[in-house]
Every structure is written in C-alpha cells, then in structure tokens.
Image (cartoon, rainbow, N blue to C red):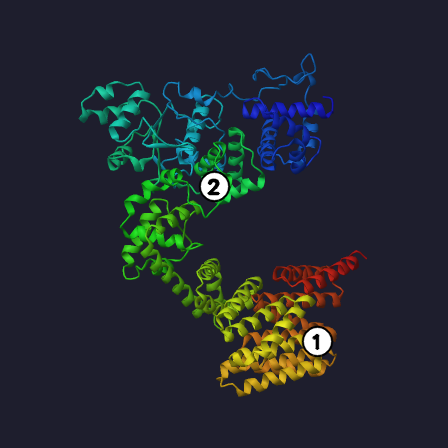
Amino acid sequence: MADDRTAMVNWVKKALSAFQNRPLTDAQCSLIDQFLQGKTIENAAKDSGYSVIHAKRVSADIGEAIALEMGESKRINKSSWLPKIRDYLRQQPESDFVDAEGSIAHPSIPNQNFVGRERAIAPSIPDRQALRQLPYCNFLNQNNEFIGRETELKDLLKFISLNYRAPIITVDGIGGVGKTALVLEAAYRCWEAKHGTQTDTSIIFDAIIITSAKADYLFSTGIVPRLQRHNNLQDIFRQIASTLDDPSITQAAPEEQLNRVYQSLGRQKTLLIVDNLEAIADKNEVLAFLSDLPPSTKAVITTRQQVVMYASMRLDCLPEEDSLRLIQQQIIEKGVTLSDDRARQLYKRFGGVPIAIIYAIGQIASGYSLETLLDRSSPLPEDLARFCFEGSVQPLRGQTAHKLLMSLAIFHEAPVWDAVVEVAGLKADPIAVNRGLAQLQQLSLVRQREGRYEMVSLNREYALAEIAGYSDFEKEARERWIKWYLNLAEKHGQFFWQEWHIEYDVIQDEQGNLLDVLHWCANQERYTDVKNLCRNLHYYTNAYGYWEDRLFWMNWLISASERRGDWSTAVYAMSEKAWTLLLIGGQKNLEIAHKILTKAWELRDRADIIVQNNLSEYIAYICIENKKYEEAHIWLNVKEDILNKADLDKREYLPHWMIVPYYQAKIYYKIGDHHRAKLLYLKLFEESQKIDFQRGIIAAQQGLAAIAIVHKELDEAEKLLNTGLPVAERTKHKKRTACYQRLFCFLEESRGNFEKASEWATKALDGFNRLGMTGEAEEMCSLLNSLKSKTIL
C-alpha cells in the first residue's frame, strides 16, 4: 500500500463512515484532513471553522472507528493514529483497498466516492425508524445519536441479559434525565444482537414490547399532550396483544386475560418495557403482574419514583463532557451558533439534565434570548419546570416532605441531616423527617450521599421558586438557617490549643454553605450576623489559608462598620485585613498593611484590649520584615505592657505572650545571633510543652531546625523536622506545612541530595502558590532552578 497521506485520509474516512453507518458530514471530512496533517484538536477546529467540542467528539469517534477496523479492543489515542495507520495499511494487500480508479471503495455505503472493506459483521444496521415497522417490536422514536451513559448502558444490558437472574430491572431518576432514552438504546442493542450486528447472544429477544404512560412531550414550543398512553394494566395487555399479534388476549373474558398474556409471553423470549410507571393508575397491580412473568420474559421499568425490587439503577445528570457533546449535537441539528464558552454556560445553567438542554437550544433556535436563558435570576421556563417537576411536587404540598424540599433548596451545598431538620423547623418530629426525606429520595428530588442530602441544580432552582410562594415559611426558615451556621461557627471556630483541625474540619465541611450565608446576610444588610460570623471564623481561615476570602470580608466589614460608626469593629477589621496582607507577603502588601495599621493604631482606644495587643504584634512583624529590629523590640515591649494590663486568664494570656519570645528569636536569627535565638526557641518549646500548646511547639521546632541546618547539625535538624512536619500536616496548618517543606529542601541541599531537595522545593512551591504567597513562591522557583542545574552537573 502506498504510504501517502491521501490514502490514509481516505482509509480513515471509510472507517469512520462504516463505524457510524452513515455518510460523513462536511465537518467530519474537514477535521479528518486537519488531524492527519498532525494538527492538535484546537488548531484543527480553528482552521476548519468548527467548535473545539465538536472536534473532540469527532476525534473520539475516529479513535473508536480505527480501533474497530484494526481489531483492537480499546479506542486508539490521537497521538498514535499516524504510525498505527501506516503500519496497518502496509500490511494489507493493495487490491483490498483500491478500486480501478484508485479510490477507496465500500459498496455497502451508497452515494460515497470513497469506501473500504466491510467489517466482519452481519448486514448494516437499519435506520431506527424502520424498527417501528418490524413485527414483534414497537420502538418509540429515537433517531439521534445516543450520547454518554456508557457505564449505565453496559450495566443495564448486563441486567437485561437472560443470563442475569433478576426478572425486573428498574431505572429511576428525575424527570428529563434520560431514563427512557437509556432503556430504548438498550432495547435497540438487543435488536441488533438478534439481527447479527452485536455479538452478545444473551441479550437476544424474539419480541421487544414497549408501553408508556408518559402524559406529555416537551418541545421548544411548549408541552404537547401525548395522544396514546398506557395508563393501566388493561392498556399494557392490549399493547402486548398488538405487538405479539395475539388477539386471543383481548378477546378473552377479563378474568382470563392475565393467563392468556402469560401464555403468550411464554412462547418466546420477550423484553417488556414499562415506561413512566409513576403515571400508571393501578401501579400496584402492574407491579404484581410483572412479578409473576414467565422465566422467558425480562421487564424493565422507568420511573421518577424509586422502586427497589430486584436490580435497580438510578440515573444522575450527565457529566460535563457528555452534556457538552449533547449541546453540540443539538446546535448542529437545530442550526444554532453557540461558542464553546456559551455552551459551558448553558451546561452550568441547566446542569446535565438532557431534556433541559434540548429544550433550551430549541428555545434559542426559536428566537428566544440566550441571555435570558442563562440568567440564573430569571425563573426556570414555565414549561420546563412543569414538565420535569410539577407532577412530582404537587402531591407533596402541605406535607412534611414539601417543607423539607423547600428547606433543602436554601442550602448552597448538600447539608447534613441536623441542618435540614433545624431549618425546616421539624426538630421535634424526627420520624416524620425521615419519612419525608425518604419520600423525596424515592421521587429522585433529593439524593443521600455520605450523610448529606444533595439536589441537582435544576431541582434546587425549582425548589427555590417553590419556596418563594411561601413567604412566611421562607422568612422563618432563613432565620433558622442563619442561626444554625452562627452556632456552628461559634462552637467549632474558637482558638484551640491542640488538634484544632478536628474542630476546624467541621467548618471546612460546611465552607460552601457558610460562604453562602455570609453573602446572603451581606446582601440583606444583616451587619451583625456578618460581623459575628467573621469573628467566629477568624482562627479557621488563618490556619487553613483562606486569605483571599478574609480580605474580601474584612473590606466589607471596614466599609459597613465605618458607615455605622462601629469603630470597635472597624479597628478589628483593619487589623485583620493588615495581618492577612502580611501573611500573603510581598513588598506591596507590606506597605499597604503598614498604612492600615498606622490608621488603626490611631483609633486603638476604640478597640478592645485583644485588638490593641494584635495591632502592636502586627506592627512589630512589619518592623522585622523591614529589618528595623530595634523598633520591633520596642513594639514587642508595648505588646507585653498591653497584655500585663489586660485582665486575661492564663489560657487566654499565654498564646498571646508566647508570640514575644518567638518574634525575639526571629530577630536574633536574622541578625546572626543564633545562640540567643536558639535559647529563645528552646524557651518557647519548653513553655509550650508544659501546657501542650501545639502551635508553640511546632513553631519552636521549625526555628530550631533552621538554626541546626545553618550550623550543619543535619541529623538534629532532620529529627526536628520529622517531628514538626507531621503535626503541621495533620492539623492542616498550610503556611506552617509549606515552611517545613522549605526547610527540608535546605536540609537536603546541605547534604548534596539535590534531587530530594528539588522534590521538597516543588512541594513547598505548590504550598506557597496555593496560599498566594508570591514572595516565598518566587524564592522557591529560583532555588528550584538552581537545584536542577546542580542535578544536571
């Protein structure tokens, strides 16, 4: 075979066309040409004028197609296409590929001027519309390419298999999530198996029967009632009789029909699909009928309400990648132009609910404003809300489950049971709560995962609209919501002497919800609530490195407190904004912090004694950073004077006092007086050990390790670092952890272990970058480059 790009392009086109069993689109042809020139997906998309999303999908299909053609089991990565195709084509007889005119030929695909060899499979797959005309098969219309759900489809086919013992399989999920589409795709795969286009003989059925109680269709023009429905057991019997062409079923007396149905089903292997079980009037009778089906029959049920019988599957929303593929499919089909960025915004607005995506793009194609559809402040389109949710929510109104649903919508992220119960005002009746939550889960409106109750974004948006109609309940629920998080922050955000991460992790688990409470209170001008939350989260945000969030809220508090003349809070917020800037570091932040602290010190008489103490400490820190060591000593003396005048108990006094010897040790270390620095670090270590104060212990060990490294006492340094780093990591003190990693880097560099030093430098660099500590990060970058050059040498 001639080794030229034209031959490879034609062969790939042939493989992809055979894989999808239809002629290629202009987009596919153009992208294949670009890919086989060696271009990246992004560049190929740009040069061909198509979106990156579409190019990625074509790339994935090509990888599948050529793998199938070459007899490989896994998709071939794009980076391997060229060598693999060259090797494959060189091994083939040229006559197998080239016709008399030199074109690639494939007689099974009409109206193509390039074709190739037939794959080793039975006749080509017919159009799915044709299936509706076949005997023993009554497929609903499903023409589009099936997107995503590969794992779910594989599981469903396993359950449907005649080798699997479960006689009934249930597929549940919220309205519009794709239950029917999944089941129909599985049915189509079963039909393919019967007609030789699939190799799995365990999913071959002689008859495939579909019944549906779906009441409506949702189109971009609105909700359209469905004219033919199977609303009860008798309707299902009539559908079975029609599909199996057995009039004896409907001609029999009512009391005989059940036996006739079982007899008729038992004559062949049958797949029976019952779509939208929740809409069937005599649901229990239908379930009883399905429970006694003959062994040759498998039943698949789709339902919004969870029914656990034998094998069951719950459909979640499509993941982002598959949702974007669906968006791409729909915009091509409907002739809509949508950028990749807009496609992602559409996904974020409607989540991975397929029917919502399809409806939204239909609306755009019909002339509706994309901006309105993307605007979260706008309510969900009425037709979409009614189609997906109204039938499930309407029966709940006035019940415990309805209060729980509305309360859950208030939470930005999935809440724990206690929070839901508190906000719903149902703490006195836990039995009713558990029953209501179970009801919501059965309706696929809520899902419990790892002790939390999740709602998909579309469900939450509908529930928020629902609670807006119950203003008195919403007002009370919001008050309880704020109170619950205020209590949580107060209880778990205090200053703890040891193992503080145990308490702070409770806050960490609720971080998203706490931020939402803060933003909601700020928007509602609930100043006192914001102030109290910020104060209670002070130590947590400091230790866990949420410094950007702290800056935002300190700025808010400064502005809000000055407007109200609350100077005590204003000085507090100024001091903590300055300290946060100092934690982040950098000369510019140092200068800004100095200006803020100067102003705050002038207003110190308006602040409480602890804030005054902190102000003197932060100013001392700036003096140390600016190498004004004598001035720093003066400010540390001021700090001691303030503490001595304060009426503090021992446990409150000691953590503030220990900062003094710690900063004094830093000063002596920086001026090269390592002896005095070591004595002060040892003093800090001993005093901290007496009261089991972990912050003091690990800070002292860090300082002692730095001195040991300078004096080449490397084994001692390693011992200190190995003791302190695990504590810093365990307690999730992010700054202290990164500083320890930096010292490990210095230690290994001193030993000449440049590779290990580089590993530690990389870890420290990552830590400093995450914290936004640009000065330290730049220092690590420079050191890392130096270490790499030493490693090469």
Judge whether 747 appears above or below 458 on screen: below
How many other residues sit within 10 Å of disc 2, few (<14), some (14-19) or many (≥20)? many
Kind of residue sitting beneath label 1: Ile
Quarter of the N terminus within the rendering: top right
Judge whether 628 appears above or below 543 on screen: below
| Residue at 49 percent of width and 38 percent of height | 369
Place of residue 291 in the rendered image (x, y in percent of width and height, measured from the top left): 28, 35
SS at circle 1? helix
User: Would residue 214 be seen by someone viewing this image from the given angle?
Assistant: no
The residue wearing badge 1 is: 707
Q: Earlier in the sequence, mark 2 or mark 1?
A: 2
Place of residue 576 in the rendered image (x, y in percent of width and height, measured from the top left): 56, 71
The residue wearing badge 2 is: 373
Side of 127 where 577 appears, left or right: right
Judge whether 669 appears above or below 201 on screen: below
Q: Residue 101: which quarter of the image?
A: top right
Quarter of the C terminus within the rendering: bottom right
Mark 2 against mark 1, which lies toward the viewer? 2
SS at circle 2? helix
CA gap between label 2 and label 1 equals: 62 Å
